[in-house]
Amino acid sequence: MRLMADLIRGMEVAKALYVLKHSSKEASIRLEKLLLSALTNWQTKNPEASVDSGLVVQSIMVDGGRMLKRVQPAPQGRAHRVRKRSNHVTLVVGRVAEEGSTSSENA
């Protein structure tokens, strides 16, 4: 999941969706759904703005989530622990910050 997150961080939304759709990794399917959900949420909060106008993946973080602990039989009556890991993904979508619009006052 972190590999795919690093791949789309800072990309435009349309390009990120294209990359996720054509990737062969399993995590890309889940990240694509998450990005589409974030786009829908952004449209809901900004009904007057268009989606095509400079939206980027501002930040994306992948943190550890719950872990399912299972036991797998091993030879001679022993058992090995199997940890099935999951994760939490935080995705922020927004407009590109224009460099000329930042006001830095040096008086």
Image: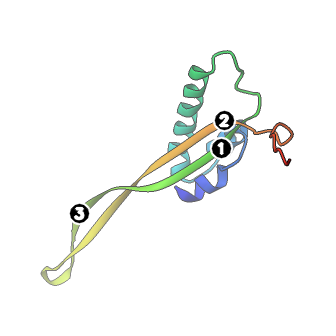
Residue at the far bottom: name it: 76
- The correct choice, above or below, for 49 with respect to 22 in the image is above
* Between marks 1 and 3 in the image, the one whose residue lies nearer the viewer: 1
Rate crowding at label 1 as few (under 14), some (14 to 19) or many (20 or more) other CA atoms within 10 Å: some
Instruction: Looking at the image, tell me whether mark 2 or mark 1 is earlier in sequence order.
Output: 1
| Residue kind at label 2, given as amino acid type | Gly
Residue drawn at x 66%, y 50% as measured from the top left: 9
Can you tell which mark lies on residue 70?
Answer: 3
Residue drawn at x 51%, y 45% as measured from the top left: 90
Instruction: Looking at the image, tell me whether mark 2 or mark 3 is earlier in sequence order.
Output: 3
From the image, tell me which residue sits under label 2.
Answer: 94
- The correct choice, above or below, for 12 with respect to 70 in the image is above
Label 2, label 3: how many angstroms apart (C-alpha)? 40 Å
Residue 69 position within the rendered picture, expressed as x and y whole percent measured from the top left: 25, 62
Residue at the far left: name it: 77
**Secondary structure of the residue carrying numbered label 2:** strand
From the image, tell me which residue sits under label 1.
Answer: 58
| Residue kind at label 3, given as amino acid type | Arg
| Residue kind at label 1, given as amino acid type | Gln
Rate crowding at label 2 as few (under 14), some (14 to 19) or many (20 or more) other CA atoms within 10 Å: some
Residue 40 position within the rendered picture, expressed as x and y whole percent measured from the top left: 56, 26
Residue 72 located left or right of residue 50: left
* Between marks 2 and 3 in the image, the one whose residue lies nearer the viewer: 2
**Secondary structure of the residue carrying numbered label 3:** strand
Instruction: Confirm or deny contact between disc 2 and disc 1 (CB under 8 A).
Output: yes
Residue 91 position within the rendered picture, expressed as x and y whole percent measured from the top left: 55, 43
Residue 22 position within the rendered picture, expressed as x and y whole percent measured from the top left: 65, 45
Q: Quadrant of residue 78?
A: bottom left
Residue 14 located left or right of residue 92: right
Rate crowding at label 3 as few (under 14), some (14 to 19) or many (20 or more) other CA atoms within 10 Å: few
